[in-house]
Image: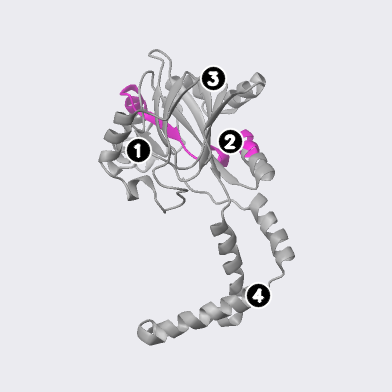
């Protein structure tokens, strides 16, 4: 099992480059909020209404981010998330592409701006590996080992398997690891690790970037293998409504299973692997 790790970024110029290229000059966010037009993906305080409709209504007017409302929420202690910055900031798009070229993992990144001494999301886990890069202020990360092995996509998402007793249990036992991040430090957070971050400084806001890294899995390979069958006529034939039940459907399942076996038996593995590599370093799966 992977463990979280922290490292000091030795090239301080790279931190300055990141900060200077961030939209709105994030280090001056409170002054920039009146000019904000980017569609913020998340506004949250102490875990409340993290993905709820009310929050989105509260910070938008006519479907667009309302800078005045957003400023009020921020000053009221809410964390602001700016989502998918690799789509809108050329510098960060280059960073995202570089990660994918080196690893074969697609990725996206968010910026989180937390008021001094406040907290956004409470205890939760994510469905992909993350690299946390602290830009300004400081943040403490309480970490617990995964409740479920290798969560991914919709499978074993926090809210799908959530038990109200989880937080009481974690707080009673205490974190397995506690990490404090300051500007220029990073944290590798494997998927599934429970985390509960807090901004530490009482007079300095915390700004960090989260690079969400989509690791490739055998599920991804299997999907690519199956995806090729669309090129064969037999897999594109219509299954009639009357066959979508009972013994007729069972027979269709047997037929398709055998067709898959035959298809995979004739696969040129080396050619497929080359195509798979090209997909790994180029395909974008943008999600929030």
Residue found 30% across the figure and 44% down from its top: 53
Check disc 1: other Cα within 10 Å, few if <14, some if 14-19, many if 20+: some
Tag 2 and tag 1, C-beta contact below 8 Å: no
Does residue 164 sit above or below 238 in this rendering? above
Q: Nearer the viewer, mark 2 or mark 3?
A: 3
Q: Residue 265 — which label?
A: 4
What sort of colour scheme is used for the picture? one colour
Mark 2 or mark 3: name the one nearer the start of the chain.
2
Percent from the top left, x then y, of residue 15?
61, 23
Is any part of residue 45 visible from this angle?
Answer: no
- Say above or below: 116 vs 48: above
Residue beneath label 3, please? 183
Region rendered in magenta: 71-95
- Callouts 4 and 2 close, C-beta under 8 Å: no
Mark 3: few/some/many CA within 10 Å (<14, 14-19, 20+): some
What's the CA distance linking mark 4 and mark 1? 54 Å
Q: Confirm or deny contact between disc 4 and disc 1 (CB under 8 A).
A: no
Residue tagged 1: 60
What x and y, as percent, mark residue 5? 54, 30
Which tag, 2 or 1, sits closer to the chain's start?
1
Residue ID for mark 2? 89
Residue 115, label in figure? none
Measured in 3D between alpha carbons, the distance from the residue under mark 4 to the one under mark 3, in whole angstroms, is 53 Å
């Amino acid at each position: 099992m992977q463990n979280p790790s922290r490292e000091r970024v030795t090239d301080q110029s790279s931190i300055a480059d990141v900060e200077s290229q961030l939209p709105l000059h994030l280090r001056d966010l409170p002054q920039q909020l009146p000019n904000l037009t980017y569609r913020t993906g998340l506004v949250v305080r102490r875990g409340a209404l993290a993905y709820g409709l009310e929050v989105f209504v509260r910070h938008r007017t006519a479907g667009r981010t309302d800078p005045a409302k957003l400023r009020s929420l921020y000053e009221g202690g809410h964390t602001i998330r700016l989502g998918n910055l690799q789509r809108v900031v050329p510098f960060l798009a280059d960073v995202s592409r570089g990660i994918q070229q080196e690893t074969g993992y697609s990725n996206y990144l968010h910026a989180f701006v937390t008021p001094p001494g406040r907290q956004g999301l409470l205890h939760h886990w994510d469905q992909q590996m993350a690299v946390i890069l602290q830009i300004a202020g400081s943040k403490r990360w309480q970490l617990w080992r995964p409740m479920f092995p290798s969560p991914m996509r919709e499978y074993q998402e926090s809210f799908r398997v959530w038990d109200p007793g989880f937080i009481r249990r974690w707080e009673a036992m205490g974190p397995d690891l506690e990490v404090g991040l300051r500007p220029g430090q990073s944290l590798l957070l494997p998927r599934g690790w429970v985390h509960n971050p807090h901004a530490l400084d009482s007079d300095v806001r915390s700004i960090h970037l989260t690079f969400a890294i989509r690791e490739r899995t055998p599920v991804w390979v299997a999907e690519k293998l199956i995806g090729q069958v669309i090129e064969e006529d037999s897999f594109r034939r219509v299954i009639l409504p009357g066959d979508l039940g009972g013994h007729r459907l069972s027979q269709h399942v047997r037929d398709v299973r055998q067709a898959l076996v035959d298809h995979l038996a004739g696969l040129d593995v080396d050619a497929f692997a080359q195509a798979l590599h090209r997909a790994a370093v180029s395909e974008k799966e943008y999600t929030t």
